[in-house]
Image (tube, grey):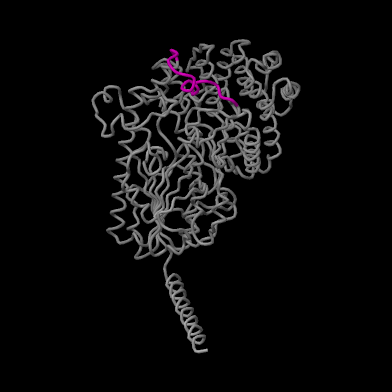
Amino acid sequence: MEKMRYYTFLHISVSLFLLGILLACQLENEELPPPNILWITSEDNSKHYLKLFDENGVSTPNIESLAEEGLVFTRAFSNAPVCSVARSTLISGCYAPRIGTQFHRKYIPVPMPDSLHMFPWYLREAGYFASNNQKKDYNIIEGEGVWDESSGEATWQNREGDQPFFHVFNIGISHESGLHFSSQEMDSIVTKTSENSFEIQPNHPQTRTFAYTNAYYRDKVRAMDNKVGEVLDELRKDGLMDNTFIFYFGDHGGVLPGSKGYLYETGLHVPLVVHIPKKYRHLVNMPMKTTIQDFVSFVDFGPTVLNLAGIPTPGNMDGKPFLGPKITKNDRNMRNVTFSYADRFDEKYDMVRAVRKGKFKYIRSYTPFNPDGLVNNYRYKQLAYQEWRAMYAVGELNKMQSAFFEPRQPELLFDVEADPFETVNLANQKGYEDVQDDMRQTLDAWVKGMPDLSFFPEHHLIEDAFTDPVIFGKEEQQRIERYMAITDLSLSPFVEVKDQLIAGLQSADPWERYWTIIVSSSFREKAKLLASQIGKLAQSDPELINRVRAAEFLGIVRASSPVEIMTKALYESEKPSEALLILNSIVLMQSSNAAYTFNLDPDKIAMVVVKDSQVKRRLDYLVPQGRHDVPK
């Protein structure tokens, strides 16, 4: 009896003791102010160059130090492979093709959707000091009240007293522009990283230029890490490490050839480390030094910051928080999908969407006749790009290395664990039918659900949609779904969809004709029997861009030269974005196997067009030096 009383007393005592500790911790946590949150972003670097994420990378001791008391996310993704689109996704928490921010660089900024604000606005409303040093590069109208301070001098130290802060520090050391060295510099500057200390990815030429560029870039990554260390030292000096969440991540992938600007893992898969401060570990239900394999993407970052600050995610954001209160293990287990998008990059147009689910990646090319290697002037300032293209032109590349310069298939499917550089297309291969069908359905549901505004040409969106892109998308959702159905015809054998294509070419809807012509072009020579009907559209379609697309088809199938029709259309256009799309087709035709020759006269191009900065880039490539100078 006495023994039973003793154990009962002991049980009660232990229970009361534990309850006391729990209540004390809860009381302490309740008395804590909201945590500080710091973002350290580095430009243009995917996870492939940091040893923390990839054995082929270099050591980054300062970033690695964050992982000692934090989490390493091995599956973190930008939703876009270029800065303005990626940053617009980050700051809005919304998918870019839904809200009209998918074009880099913007012609006009679009408003935030509905009553939504950029997420730092909600932090400021809750009492935070929000500062940004210093890059923004949004495709959105910023609005009032987003930042307390945004400049090259912005710092958390300018807040009042112990006011909680959200601060962004951007590091540009690893930016693409850092690889615009000359051949003379390549011969004279010795890299700290040995050219023999890593492997060149298999779809690149295995040359000295690529080895040097890899080594040079890895030096940039080391220098970037040193800058991270300086920021952390400043935080330690201010005694803030124990109450500040620190996110380190790349702002998208890059920057060796075929990464930045492309929906491959090297363009999207970013490094992410989150330091969890000691005083706020109760907000994160995971042990330190944990490697997290959940899928997280930029659309989720804003909601995550708000959640850590105790602020609900606005209902019209697309993203979901991945850290903070109420995030359970089951929530994390559901995170196995990420979506991405590519449209215009400077002067180069394309339209590609992708989904990664688990180890599989599915890429949908809506204009598959555009090769990845279609000229983009800024990309081709890099010697490695120049050498890659030159080697292709003289037949010095193998099949894998040549793929960058050749038309794509409408569907690409990769096992990115077995094939990390996405070189073996599994689409339409035996044994992958179910995976391909599942991935296609997943992507289609997302594209329809937005809905995706890019099924209208950019110049039409500028004129009719960009005063309120989200409302426009909702009003035009049925039309967008019709255009999607037309693009899906490219996934079937031509003989099965020929009659539908013929009907589409006769549609009264100009954008049904537009997409029908594009799909016909994706069939290439198989669709040559449509040349007569499409030839009539090339001569007389009321939409200027449809005449160009029709001429593009004629050029692709080699039914007739597109030069006269495209040139005339360029001279007629008075819309810079429309003219830029025409020039995209001209560049494709001039660089194709048929190598059609264009002799453009800039004096015949409308002044509003020829003065456009993106049009100038195309003319720099197409027109002999000095012939396209225009008055300032």
Magenta stretch: includes residue 184: no
Image-quadrant location for residue 624: top left
**Residue at 49% across, 41% down:** 139
Question: In the image, 614: left or right of 570?
Answer: left
Question: In the image, 458: left or right of 504?
Answer: left
Image-quadrant location for residue 55: top left
**Residue at 45% across, 64% down:** 282
> Is residue 348 something that shows in the picture?
yes
Residue 348 place in picture, x, y as percent:
50, 27
The residue closer to the viewer here, 521 or 405, is 405
Image-quadrant location for residue 486: top right
Residue 530 place in picture, x, y as percent:
70, 16
Indicate whether 558 appears above or below 158: above
Magenta stretch: includes residue 396: yes
**Residue at 63% across, 31% down:** 431
The residue closer to the viewer here, 187 or 133, is 187
| Outermost bottom residue | 2
Indicate whether 31 appears above or below 528: below
Question: In the image, 521: left or right of 210?
Answer: right
The part of the chain drawn in magenta is 393-409
Residue 579 place in picture, x, y as percent:
54, 24
**Residue at 44% across, 37% down:** 253
The residue closer to the viewer here, 380 or 568, is 380
The residue closer to the viewer here, 130 or 342, is 342
Indicate whether 372 appears above or below 13: above
> Is residue 148 something that shows in the picture?
no
